[in-house]
Amino acid sequence: MTEEYQKVRDNLTSIIEDASVAMLVTQQEDGKLVSRPMQLQKVEFDGDIWLLTRTDTDKYDEINVNNRVNVAIASKSYASISGTAEFVDDEARKKEFWNPIYEKMFDVAYDDPQLVLIKVHAESAEYWETGSTVKSVYNFVKKVVGKEEPVKPSKDTNQSLDL
């Protein structure tokens, strides 16, 4: 892993960890994209993003049909993270993430069987730092982080890569 790659990865991590809310984008069966705000769970970013939802929501149904998602963050800086989502039913982790405010939001307690975690495995990401050039992270697959070097974008372009 080069110093430049590590710097880019650290910047992305900082943007994610500094944010409290993100927009989760899923796809309906008819192909339409749907975005909704989601509370980010405060854990060290290791390539996965954690969210909470209920099993009786549209997003739950949409992810069951197509688990390709995007997580968009807008705060002091901006990030767009694409990957796959999976549902995790882990009581200890739900309890770790639980905030009393969620009881009002979800109308359930942390141990309710309708409450489930969404684990988004980041595959690619790009971010924009306020007042800076666009920087991109490519091949951001958790299992191969550090094995692929990012393509360094020019100061005037935003590069994309299909994985």
Image (cartoon, grey):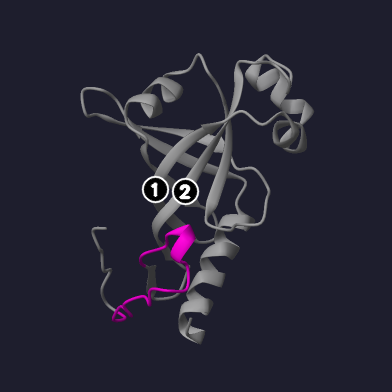
Q: Position of residue 95 (x, y in %)?
A: 76, 32
Which of the two residues, 76 or 21, is positioned nearer the viewer here? 21
Q: State yes or no: residue 143 in magenta.
A: yes
Q: Taking 117 as reference, is 150 left or right? A: left
Q: Magenta segment, principal secondary structure? A: loop
First reached walking from the N terminus: tag 2 or tag 1:
1
Q: Characterize the local packing of mark 1: few (<14), some (14-19) or many (20 or more) Cα atoms within 10 angstroms.
A: many
Please give the label number shown on residue 105.
Answer: none
Residue in the image at 39% along x and 76% along y: 133
Mark 2 touches mark 1? (CB < 8 Å)? yes
Q: Quadrant of residue 53?
A: top right
Residue kind at label 2, given as amino acid type = His
**In this view of the protein, which residue sits in the foreground, 133 or 79?**
79
What's drawn in magenta, residue-wise? 138-155
Q: Is residue 1 magenta?
A: no
User: Residue 121 has which mark?
Assistant: 2
Q: Secondary structure at mark 2?
A: strand
Of helix, strand and loop, which one carries label 1?
strand
Q: Determine whether, in the image, residue 161 is placed left or right of residue 57.
A: left
Question: How many marks on residues?
Answer: 2
**Residue 94 x/y as whole percent:** 70, 32
Disc 1 designates what residue? 83
Question: Which residue appears at 33% of the width and 80% of the height?
Answer: 152
* Residue 69 position by quadrant: top left
51 up-or-down from 76: above or below? above
Residue lying at 56% horizontally and 61% vertically, measured from the top left: 15
Image position, residue 110 (x, y; %): 73, 23
Q: Residue furthest bottom?
A: 3
Q: Is residue 33 left or right of residue 38?
A: left
Kindly identify the amino acid type of the residue bearing the numbered disc 1: Gly
